[in-house]
Amino acid sequence: MLTNYFKTNGMVMGWGLLLLVFFWIVILIILPQIYMFNLSFHPHLPPPEMGGPKDFLTLENYRYLVFGADGNPDGYNKVDLLVFIRTLTAAAFVTILDLFLCYPIAYYLGQSTGGGFVRILVLLLIIPYWINEILRAFAFKIIFGDSGVINEFLMFFSVIDSPIDFIRANVALYAGLGYAYILLMIFPMYNVIESLDRNQIEAARDMGAPWWMIHKRIVIPYAKPGISSGCTMVFMLSAGALAAPQILGGPSSLWFTQLVYQWFNTGGNWPQASAYAIILLLACLVIVLSVMKLFKVNMGDIGK
Amino acid sequence: MIKQPLYIRIGLALYLFMFFTYLIGPLILMSITAFNSASFPQITPWEVLTFEWFPKLFSDDRILRGLKYSLYVGFFTVILSVSMGLAGALMLTQIWPKLRSTYYTIIIAPILVPGVVIGISTLVFWAEINRILGFSADSYLQNGIFLSVLGQSTFIASYCMLVFVARLQRYDTGLTEAALDLGATHLQAFRRIQLPFLAPAMASSSVLAFLASFENYNTTIFTHQKFATLTIVLSQKVRYGIDPTISALAFIIVCLTVLGALIHEVRTRRVQLALANGAPVGAVTGGFKAPKFFAGNPAAVVLGLFVGAAVLIIGFAQVYDPAPAKQAYTDQKRAIQKKAIEAIQQKARDKVRERQMKGPKVFETKKGTGTGSPGKDSFGSVFKPNNLDEAAGTKKKKPVGVNPGKGAFGNIWKSDNLDKVAPKEKGN
Amino acid sequence: MSSGVAVDLQDMWIKFGDFVAVRDANVHINGGDFFSFLGGSGCGKTTILRAVSGFLEPADGKILIGGNDMKGKGPNERPTALIFQNLALFPLMKVWENITFSMEVRGASAGERRKRADELLDMIALSDQGDKLPSELSGGQKQRVAIARALCAEPDVLLLDEPLSALDLGLRHHMRTELREIQKRVGITFIYITHDQGEALTMSDNVAVMRTAVIDQIGSGKSVYDDPSTSFVASFVGMNNMFRGKVKSISKGQALVETNRTGNLLARITTGATGKLAVGDDAMVFIRPEGLHIAEKSAKSNTRIKANVRHSEFEGTSYNVFLEGDAGKEMKMSLVNRGEARLYEPGAELTLQFDATQAVVVPAGELASE
Ligand SMILES: Nc1ncnc2c1ncn2[C@@H]1O[C@H](COP(=O)(O)OP(=O)(O)O)[C@@H](O)[C@H]1O
Ligand SMILES: [Mg+2]
């Protein structure tokens, strides 16, 4: 088998390919994750004590998320647990928001014949995606801030007389997150819908199906891989977002990634940060995989 | 889209309009704030048209340094992730069918893994390697650029891989075999046959990798160490106090993006048109004829308008001097402020009188409600209207308009800064 | 001009995993021969060619080129050049660059390459097309460029994988003669793959007829046509009427076969089948349509067949008469048009005869499916 591989690639190319792929998969992807996983089961120690007698395997870092520090009067680590759950539900909310927002446009673009107008629309779609994540969040801060465009506008027309705190109400955060991942929702759906034979829709319409029926019975089942691919990406990315919550989140709306960041940066507690990162990763994976299973979509469809 | 009922068409138009307002509106608003002289990025109240934030942006050391590090990181990330992505894609076409889906899952996974997870794992892993090898804490294994490149490449390579896989699906491996059969070595066959075929994918994955690296935050925030890239610098600025230099930067980035997108669109469209007309591509891409260039190519028209507008604005910035308008505005504002201050003073006097009558309790409550909590909400205070006056006050002391004779844009567009910031634009 | 180099396949097996694509192939190809592999699609022809050019390593057995064992040598180390089924012209290179690619990888200068390209372009009658891209050529022109590209590598053996299958009929016939002429001119060994027996018979010095994964017979075109070794070859090469039965007796190289529906038939045992038939064995008798005639009085009973005309058609040089024998047995007869124009009416009852040396008998076996 391996001789066949070197036969098709030759020695130089064969080894080059193998080395690059090995470096990527083993050194960059797998080993760091394994090491982080391992680290998350160790106590937080200063470097000289690592590997010493105080260094033993422990579940403490995971226990902390559930029960908090020793002697916690609540019994549970309410703050962190709440953040955890809120992050996942909010990410799900953003995903659904994007889905409803993007499906019509994906359908429209996918079924259009691709004239100049549509090409410009596609350009318009792509441009915001290439603007820096920070700047996108910044734009929403300008819009939703206390003296932002919307508040000033509303106050100017005397709809309200004191600024609405959009930031605290998380409106800015949801709008900003939804905005950030629009393209990731549209493109997978667009790609699939584009390959849907227009005749199918015409035929259905011919048989008198109303428009919602056409979508329910023909377009959506066909576009399912695209839809789930888009939803997966948007969910994972919004649950893992850090910049937008930092910039657009109100004082109370901590995102789980912010906790990770705090443990890491402010606390300098790498094992604890690793444990939180692992929990985030596992939670996202479990949710995505079960949803994919539920809708009978497989991994190979992701990224198409 | 044949004959829809009217209400559907109107609904669709409305939806499209709202959708694209949501998409483009924020960028436009943000860009506009770059030209308002107010010291906080805002549209209302509109003070005076100014270009001063641009020179300020280019004299900001942290931003320039961030840009430099971003370019370093971007450069190496492009090289590493494009080669790994290419190798990964080539391997995908050859790996044993039984292993294929596992392999694909592994190399696609970094796209789905949250960036913070990749950032942390990269950092802790290499710190451990560094410790095992007994290197000092500031060895190159702990260098922020090294770590950022590795962290970013982990998942950017997956994007590149996807681009290559798409292209490779249309590659006839018979071509490589034909080359081998004609006596080429594997390396020659790859370089001379497969690589030229992959060239478009190389180009687009390089651009993709660079942009992804340039804008990456989640991973880089953990790996950058002392080398804060532009995105990191921006995030710190946005979180801990903003001024419109960021809007200026945003405006420039928006323009570059639009320009890049338009150029790309114009080129693909030209090729398409050429193919549609049955002419060899070279015939059209070779000569440049204005009417032909624009014909049937809306993006080209937009590009033309865009460039025209840019020339006009820059030209205007050369001669525009915001000082008089600003003076007028400040005078006006000062007058308003004076009145406001008088009013406040009057109130204060009233309150003092009140307090004297009611006792000290009122004073405490007043203090609590007034300022909010700056500790929790680090930028909140910037939004508060009364800070505006303070900021306006400091601005008054500075000389307005860096170089009124040459215009505010002069030193940006003419200095060698241009080369650093806009390598793309030079080519055009 | 080289005098051509011999190619030998010795006990060669090729497998893809557990799947056997080529089973125990033994072929000797003379230097300078135009040698064809003829077989239906999927029978393993391309696989053999790929093994000879070095893209596949045989699971077992040897490949010798000019007497040298090719084991472990890559395609770029073998003195072969392959013309791919889809030609595989490099789409991003100009025609002349395509043709001289083999010189480029050896480091020849551009001037040298251009000169050689012009010579070869002259040879394939595409003199002024060198600066075009392959996509700007017609099918036949591409074909010729592929040949020139392969010849430019100066191989000892040229391998061609169904090179004409993509061309339209007229061009295909023209290219047959052209290819044969090129081969005569350069004098090297050609190994040619085709599923078209017309091509194989007209062009080749020798033909190997392949059944799935197995080579059934190797010989000149005439011998595989007139003297098939197996039932597969007999049914695959040319049109044939087949009669199943059991061997009743054998004498002087002929066998009397008691057929299921047509009575006793006498036929010649072919060279390849000699010694493989015994009395009582299942056998198949093959009689070509042109081997059947209208019976004369003197015909012996075991070279005579009774049949009814179903319909007949006139083909210019011959009549084709479709007949139905006893128990619905279908047959076809071809009569050369000698001027006495006669179309037999449907239903007419005929007695046919054949020459026992033109009818062949082989052991019963696999048939080529239509
Ligand atoms: N790379 C391969 N892997 C597995 N099976 C193959 C491969 N190449 C060819 N085969 C199988 O080997 C048989 C012979 O194929 P091939 O030599 O291409 O036939 P042909 O005579 O039409 O050229 C076919 O059944 C084909 O499916
Ligand atoms: Mg074949």
Image (tube, rainbow, N blue to C red):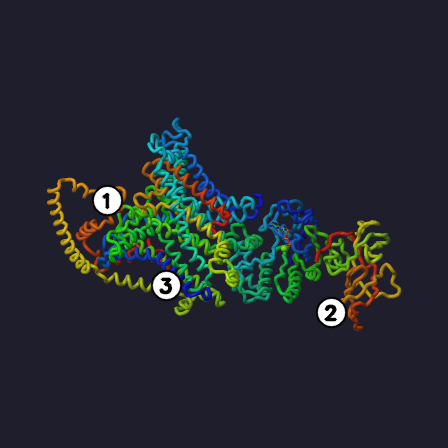
In this rendering, the label closer to the viewer, 1 or 2:
1
Q: Which residue is mark 1?
A: B372
Kind of residue at badge 1: Gly
Q: Are marks 3 and 2 on the same chain?
A: no
Between the residue at mark 1 and the residue at mark 3, the CA separation in whole angstroms equals 48 Å
In this rendering, the label closer to the viewer, 1 or 3:
1
- Decide which of B237, C188 is in the foreground and name it: B237
Q: Are marks 1 and 3 in contact (CB under 8 Å)?
A: no
Q: Is residue A293 left or right of residue B77?
A: right
Kind of residue at badge 3: Leu
- Decide which of B227, B322 is in the foreground and name it: B322
- Judged from the image, the secondary structure of the residue bearing numbered disc 3 is helix
Chain containing mark 1: B
Q: Which residue is mark 2?
A: C315
Residue at 36%, 65% in the rendered image: B304
Q: Are marks 1 and 3 on the same chain?
A: yes
> Looking at the picture, how far across and down is residue C224, in whole percent?
74, 57
Q: Which residue is mark 3?
A: B303
* Crowding at mark 3 (Cα within 10 Å: few <14, some 14-19, many 20+): many
Q: Can the viewer see residue B64 in this picture? A: no
Residue B320: which numbered mark, if any?
none
Kind of residue at badge 2: Glu
Q: Are marks 1 and 2 on the same chain?
A: no
Q: Is residue A61 left or right of residue A152?
A: right
